[in-house]
Amino acid sequence: MDEAVRAMRRRLFAALGPTRAPMSGRSSVPSLPVGRLVTLPGRGEVFVRDHRPAGAIDPPVLLLHGWSWSLDVNYFGVMPGLVADRVGFVGYDQRGHGRGLPADRPFEIEDLAADALALLDLLGVGKVLVCGYSLGGPVGLHLALARPDRVAGLVLAATALNYRQTLRDRTVWRVLTAATPLARLGIGSSISARYFGLSRRTSPELAAMWPWLLSELARTSVSGVFATGRAVSRYDLRHRVAGLRRIPAAVVITTHDTVCHPGTQRQLAGQLEARSFALPADHDAPVVRPAEFTAALLAGIAHVRSLSSK
C-alpha cells in the first residue's frame, strides 16, 4: 500500500475521535499583531491584521490562507516571523471563513481575488508580495492575472493549478457535492477540527493549543466551507499562467501532502518556472510544524525579494 494512502487512512480513523477541548491541562495561545474589522464598500465587514510599521520592508506581504482555515490558523507561526524580520504584511479572513465576508451567494475564485484587491485599495496598499497557502494560491494567481501591476512577487505553498487531476480529488468533490444539503442543516461543523485529530494525538504543542485552535476553526461555518469547496472544484489555471512567468515566484512543496498531491505542486512550479522549496510535511504543516513551515515560507519570500531587486 502506498505510504500516502496509509497516511490518509490513519487520518480518517483519527478523525472519528472527539474534538472537544480538554477540561484542564496546559494551554497556549499565539501572540499575534493587533487585528481589526474593516468594512469593504458594497461587500461587508472583514477581519484584518495590518502590520506595516514605519521602517518595515516594502512591498508588504499579502497573506492568503487555506480552505476551511482562517488567517490566524494558517499563519500564527509566520506573522511573528515577519514582525521579527521587519517585513510588513496584510492578512485577512477570506470570504466564507473566520470573520470574513459572508458566503451568502455562489462565487468563484475570481471573486475572492476581487475581495483581496478591494481590501488593498481600502488600505491604500499598492504593490504586494502575494503569499498564498492552499486555497490562497488560486486566489493569489487570479489576483496576479487580473492585476499584474499590483503583484511584485508570488510565494505559493501546498497549492495547485487545478484540483481535479487525480481520481482521489474527483471522488472528494463528488462526495462534497452530495453532502451539500447536509451543510444547510449545520451538519458537518466539526469537519475542519477533525482533520487535526491524528496530529493532536501525536503533538503535545498542538494539544496545548487545541482550545484556541478549536475556537478559531469554529468561526468558519460549514456552509462557507462547502461554498468555497465548490469554487475550488471548478478552478483551473493550467493553461493560463504562462504570462505570469515575468513575476518572480517561489513554490513551497509539502512533499508528504495527502491533500494537495506533490505532483500537482511541482506542476505549478514548472508552469511558473519558479524555484521550489521542499518541506517534508503534510498539508497541516502550518499548524503542526509551524517553525519549519515559517522557515520555508520566509526562505521563499527572501528568494522572491532578491529577484525583484534585480
Image: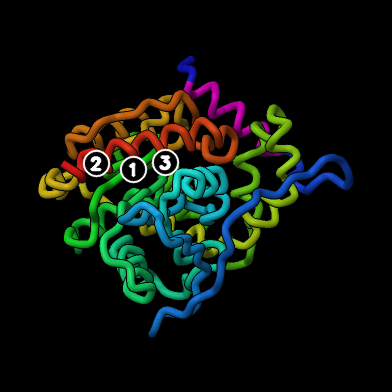
Cα–Cα span, label 2 and label 1? 8 Å
Q: Inspect the image, locate mark 3, and give the three-letter code of the amino acid beneath it.
A: Thr
Residue at image position (66%, 52%) is: 190
Q: Amino acid at mark 2?
A: Ala
Q: Is residue 282 left or right of residue 251?
A: right
Magenta stretch: give its range. 4-16
Residue drawn 64% across the image and 56% down it: 216
What residue sits right under mark 2 in the picture?
Answer: 249
Give the colour scheme of this rendering: rainbow
Image coords of residue 282 (percent x, y): 50, 30
Give the image quarter of residue 142.
Answer: bottom left
Q: Position of residue 29 (x, y in %)?
A: 70, 49
Kindly give the residue lying farthest to the front in the view shown: 55
Residue where numbered disc 1 is placed:
156
Numbered circle sitting on residue 244: none
Q: Which residue is mark 3?
A: 171
Q: Name the spot of residue 82 as percent of width and height, x first.
A: 47, 47
Q: Which of disc 3 and disc 2 is earlier in sequence?
A: 3
